[in-house]
Amino acid sequence: MAAIYRYRDALVPNSAAIAYAVGGYALGVAMLCSHAAWVAAAGVVLLAHAMIVSAYLLHDAAHLAIFRTPEANARLGTVMAWLTGACYAPFSALRHKHMRHHVDRADIVTFDAKAFLLKLPACVRRAIVLLEWLYVPAIELVMHGYVMAMPFLHADQRAQRRRVVAITMVRVALFGVLGWVSPKAVLLYLLAWLVCLTVLRFADAYQHTYDAFAVLEGNAAIPDDKVRDRAYEQRNTYSNLVSVRYPALNLLLLNFSYHNAHHDRPIEPWYRLPRAHRQLYGDDASQVIPMSRLLRGFHRHRVTRLLSADYGSMDVTHKQIDDFYGAVGVSFLTAV
């Protein structure tokens, strides 16, 4: 079985992660249906975390870092996309968007969330801002909705219409069954998904001070206005560790917070990233920002980052991060 994985040491960690993602998802959904409040609450936590792990497995599959063949990685990525609600776009589209992030060393989006907000009627914009103020990841929901709507808005996406309709019908039917078994389970499932999206966007928000570009076409070139080499990449990438003192806690996000190591070695498997980080930086913590230091800014700037023209200012050398707003709308779960 080890031969199906890309790396010889992958059997135990990858098998365990995949089993946890799938098993945790199934068990979490079952727990949502429980009449015992504490079991249902634990189910929300388990389901949300299983989705988070699924998302990061999708990410590694996009880098072809799980299995030996691209086809096997694509199959895993597709399954993980179903578990995380990212299944309306083909896995290849999710992968293409994320690879541009690495190749161009920039945040590339085809849906400009900030421009979208500014064009909305004031009452609708205020409603979205209010939801974000209330910690509802409204922009993420808009982006997921836009992925579903794209085939009906753009002629070059027409071929995806049947796919979107079919997936929508299947998911509506599945949620209908869940609602028939336990109406409250549907609401709790939505809560778990929103928790998942919030955790992912918190991690994504502070991992780069890249330039962001909204391009109308998926392959359009970005401006050649600066040297975006490997030195630029590392200088503008940050490892927002869950815990510096207890490295094992970074497994909660499948070590995705070792982001400098990931960008230095994009096909390095998730379980090797702590070692890769030590080899890359040793005791140098200049690119490390503990998540505990980012929580205040995530709360304080949760509205500011929606409409800000940039990610704010940060001086990691002197650990001045209070005005680092962070990114918004750069999720690797949406192909826009």
Image: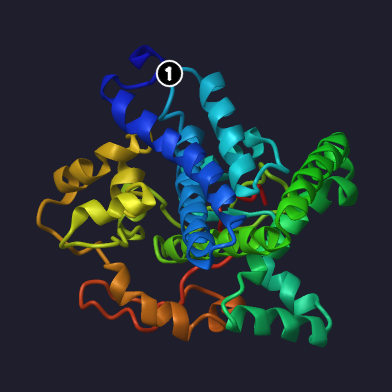
Q: Is residue 219 above or below residue 132?
A: above
Q: How many marks?
A: 1
Which of 138 and 231 lies nearest the eye of the viewer?
138
Residue marked by disc 1 = 68
On the question of residue 145 being in view, the answer is yes
On the question of residue 212 being in view, the answer is no
Residue drawn 58% across the image and 57% down it: 34
Q: Is residue 192 above or below residue 266?
A: below
Residue drawn 72% across the image and 50% down it: 178
Which of 187 and 48 lies nearest the eye of the viewer?
187
Q: Is residue 26 above or below residue 215?
A: above
Residue 315's x, y, as percent?
Answer: 29, 76
Residue 182's x, y, as percent?
Answer: 70, 56
Looking at numbered disc 1 in the image, what kind of residue is underneath it? Arg
Q: Is residue 160 left or right of residue 4?
A: right
Which of 278 and 5 lies nearest the eye of the viewer?
5
